[in-house]
Image (cartoon, rainbow, N blue to C red):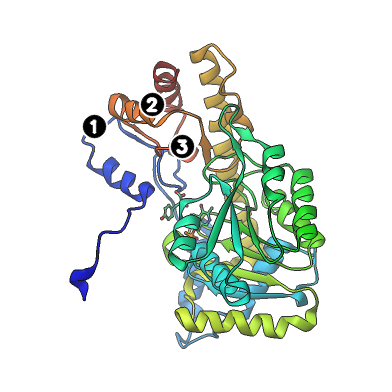
Amino acid sequence: MLNTLTPQPEDKILALMALYRDDPRDTKIDLGVGVYKDATGHTPIMRAIKAAEKQLWEAETTKSYTALSGDPAFGAAMKTMVLADSVDHARVGAIATPGGTGAIRQAFELMKLANRHGTVWTSNPTWPNHLSILKFMGLANKEYAYFDAATCTVDFDAMMASLKDVKAGDMVLLHGCCHNPTGANLTLDQYGLVADLILEKGAIALVDIAYQGFGDGLEEDAAATRLLATKLPEMLIAASCSKNFGIYRERTGCLMAMSETADNTPVTQGTLNFLNRQNYSFPPDHGARLVTMILGDATLKADWMAELEEVRLGMLGLRTQLADELRQQTNSDRFDFVAQHRGMFSRIGASPEEVLKIREEFGIYMVGDSRLNIAGLNAQTVPLLAHAVAKICR
Ligand code: PLP
Ligand code: TYF
């Protein structure tokens, strides 16, 4: 059987990680994979995570199974973090999943159960794994216009025009904040207009929120998701704790499914539990437990929020510095959008050839679509990047 297999397409972001690793230059700079790094290039364990792990090690008395949904306390904590009091939590079912990716996969599984012939609409561009998972699952996918390559901002008119073709029962996947890969985001008003259109079409929104706290703040970054929740009768939310808790390898995420009324919730929750059972049975617990502990303890939560804010402001400072350097070194305002983008990424609008030249000549690694990870920079490397961009990009 195995000799019938053919090679699968590789993940370009992960392939770039390997290229970077094998580059012998000690001046190389990694702006590829979306992992937060401090000024020394290290991805730290957050203080509150360490503290919660210590408490857990002392207090945990069993490693027995939890529940198919994961610990319900985790679902409750995630509803509070993402939705706050925007909607009645009794309307929302939740399961723990292996990372945000697991939540996205389970959202698509739910779509397959409920409306297997519906189309899932994704932004052009979007996180490549959205597309590869949809393709693998055999779900129909259409793209809606999103990024204007000329200005490196959202082309909202084009986006609304393409969403006019959404049909009843389709799914519209939106990034809740900090769009990956572009860094260009809708305003809250624009999210509202998208919600109105989704409502009018009778479609369902799936919000992928993987960077809450990395953009404008923990509450601010959830505002769009909360607005959608108040405007729409039903919606799905795939939340990741990988970035904002820095627990990438623990695989911690949550799928929330909001029904029209609380009467629907038992069946919705039962279906979510069923999907966990079909795919991997009980979801991972360790990361989810740490998140639950932190969100439920005033001291841990305050320390986590403070550190998350340091991380966010650090990235924002690098953005401003980069925009300033680019302005000086290119003697133009062409790259001013870098300071307006939010989250870990900016797509800077360089061609694939230019991205390659920057990699070869300067050892600066960004993804082929010219996405760069802001957190891969520090105060010393920002001018080096600006110099490379100014020299190579026409
Ligand atoms: N969604 C987006 C847009 C992402 O960039 C990521 C990446 O890290 C995820 C979801 C899910 O991440 P994870 O599965 O590591 O929680
Ligand atoms: O977009 C990124 O870089 C992050 C990390 O298959 C990532 O979301 C990249 C590729 C992948 C899984 C995670």
Q: Are marks 3 and 1 in contact (CB under 8 Å)?
A: no
**Mark closer to the observer (1, 2):** 2
Cα separation between marks 2 and 3 = 13 Å
Residue 309 percent across, percent down from the top left: 61, 46
On the question of residue 203 being in view, the answer is yes
**Mark closer to the observer (3, 1):** 3
Q: Nearer the viewer, residue 222 or 198?
A: 198
Residue 259 percent across, percent down from the top left: 74, 74
Per the image, the residue denoted by label 2 is 354
Q: Quadrant of residue 316?
A: top right
Q: Quadrant of residue 83?
A: bottom right
Cα separation between marks 1 and 2 = 19 Å
* Comes first in the chain, label 2 or label 3: 2
- Look at 45% across and 22% down and name the residue there: 386
Quarter holding the N terminus?
bottom left
Amino acid carrying label 2: it is Glu
Task: Say if disc 1 is inside 8 Å of ligand 2.
Answer: no
Residue 217 percent across, percent down from the top left: 67, 47
Amino acid carrying label 1: it is Arg
Residue 141 percent across, percent down from the top left: 54, 57
Per the image, the residue denoted by label 3 is 372
- Which secondary structure lies at badge 2? helix
Per the image, the residue denoted by label 1 is 25
- Look at 55% across and 68% down and name the residue there: 108
Amino acid carrying label 3: it is Leu
Q: Is residue 390 above or below residue 156?
A: above
Q: Quadrant of residue 149?
A: top right
Q: Are marks 1 and 2 in contact (CB under 8 Å)?
A: no
Cα separation between marks 3 and 1 = 19 Å
Quarter holding the C terminus?
top left
**Mark closer to the observer (2, 3):** 2
